[in-house]
Image (cartoon, grey):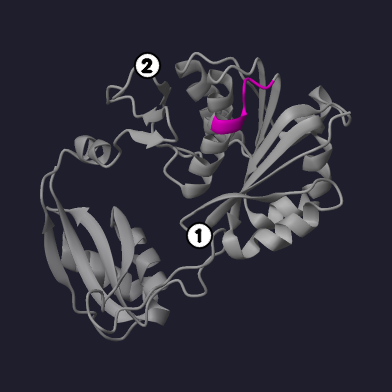
Amino acid sequence: MSWTEIVIEVARDQAEALSDALMDAGALSVSVEDADEGTDAEQPLFGEPGMEPKESAWERSRVVALADVDANHATIVADAVAALGLDYALPFALRPVAEQDWVRLTQSQFEPIHIGKHIWVVPSWHDAPDPDALVLELDPGLAFGTGSHPTTRLCMEWLESHLAAAPTVLDYGCGSGILALVAKKLGSPVVVGVDIDPQALESARFNSERNHCEIEYHLPEAFAQAYPVGQTFAVVVANILAGPLQVMAPMLAGRVAAGGALVLSGVLDRQADEVIAAYAPYISLTVWAEHEGWVALAGQLPAA
C-alpha cells in the first residue's frame, strides 16, 4: 500500500484542533512539526523528564496528515476545515511517502546494546555479539527499559559491579523487568519486581519467560500482601523519577535489609541533593555514577 502526506501550515492555536479534525475526516495519522525546523527560527519544545511541555505546538506549526494515496485529499482537508467552522480555505501541499519495509526499517533502528563489562541487550532479530556474555533478549515495547536510557544503564552497571549474587533483590518500578533480569542472571536466587502498570508487568513476565528467568512480579498492593512490612531485601533498586522517589523514601528504605544496599536512579544531577536529603533519616546515599546528566545514588545500611 502507498501513502501520501497532507501538509498544512497553521498557527499554534489551530494545530491541535486541526489535527483532531483531520483524523475525523479520514486521515490515518497526524503529527505536528515545527514549520521553522532547520532555520534560525527553529524552537525547541520539550519539558522536564516526566513533565509535559508547556506548549503542545510551535508558533508556526506544520500539521502532517497521512492518508492513502488514492484518498480524496482535498475532501479530507475541506471536511476538516468545515468541522472547525472556518470561513476560509486552508492551503495544503502533498508529499509522497516512499514504499518501505516498515518492519525491517523499525528493526534496523535497534541494534544490540553493550552495557558495563559483560552485558548485552539484544533484540530478538539479532544474534548476540558475545554469546558467552550476560545476554538479555529484549525487544522495544510499551514498558520502559531496554538499556538505552542512561538511568537504566547506570543501574545495570551498579548491579554488575556490586550485586555478587545477593540472596534477594527488589526491583521497584520494574517496567520491562530489565533490572530484575540482570539480577537473576547474575545469580540472585530470589528476585521480585513491582510496578503500578499492569501492562508493564505483562511485558516483564513475557521478557522473563523469554530469558528463562524465574522472577516474581506484583502490583504494589499484591506485593504488600505477599511481602508484608518488615520483610526486607539484600538489594533494593528503583529507577523511577526524583519526585516519586522522595515520596517513597520511608517505604523503599524500609525494604532494605541490615547490611543491604539501596540503588536509586531516574534522578537528574541537579536533583541529587534533594533525593539524598529525603533518604537521610533512613540511609546515607551518595552519587555512585553520572551519565548524560543523570545520576545513580547508592548507599548501604550497617550490618546487624
Q: Identify the secondary structure beneath mark 1.
A: loop
Residues 243 and 270: in front is 270
Disc 2: CA contacts within 10 A as few (<14), some (14-19) or many (>=20) = few
Q: Is residue 151 above or below residue 7?
A: above
Q: Earlier in the sequence, mark 2 or mark 1?
A: 2
User: Is 67 displayed left or right of 261 in the figure?
Assistant: left
Residues 160 and 252: in front is 160
Residue holding disc 2: 132
In which quadrant of the rendered image does the C terminus lie?
Answer: top right
Residues 10 and 200: in front is 200
Disc 1: CA contacts within 10 A as few (<14), some (14-19) or many (>=20) = few
Q: Amino acid at mark 1?
A: Gly
Asked whether residue 200 is drawn in magenta, I would say no
Residue holding disc 1: 293
Residue 177 visible:
no
In which quadrant of the rendered image does the N terminus lie?
Answer: top left
Q: Is residue 242 above or below residue 173?
A: below
Residues 160 and 245: in front is 160
Q: Which residues are magenta?
A: 161-166
Residue 173 visible:
yes
Spot occupied by residue 13 in the image (x, y as percentages of width and height): 42, 81
How far apart are the alpha carbons under marks 2 and 1? 32 Å
Residues at circles 2 and 1 in contact by the CB criterion of under 8 Å: no
Spot occupied by residue 9 in the image (x, y as percentages of width and height): 26, 77
Q: Is residue 30 above or below residue 303?
A: below
Q: Amino acid at mark 2?
A: Asp
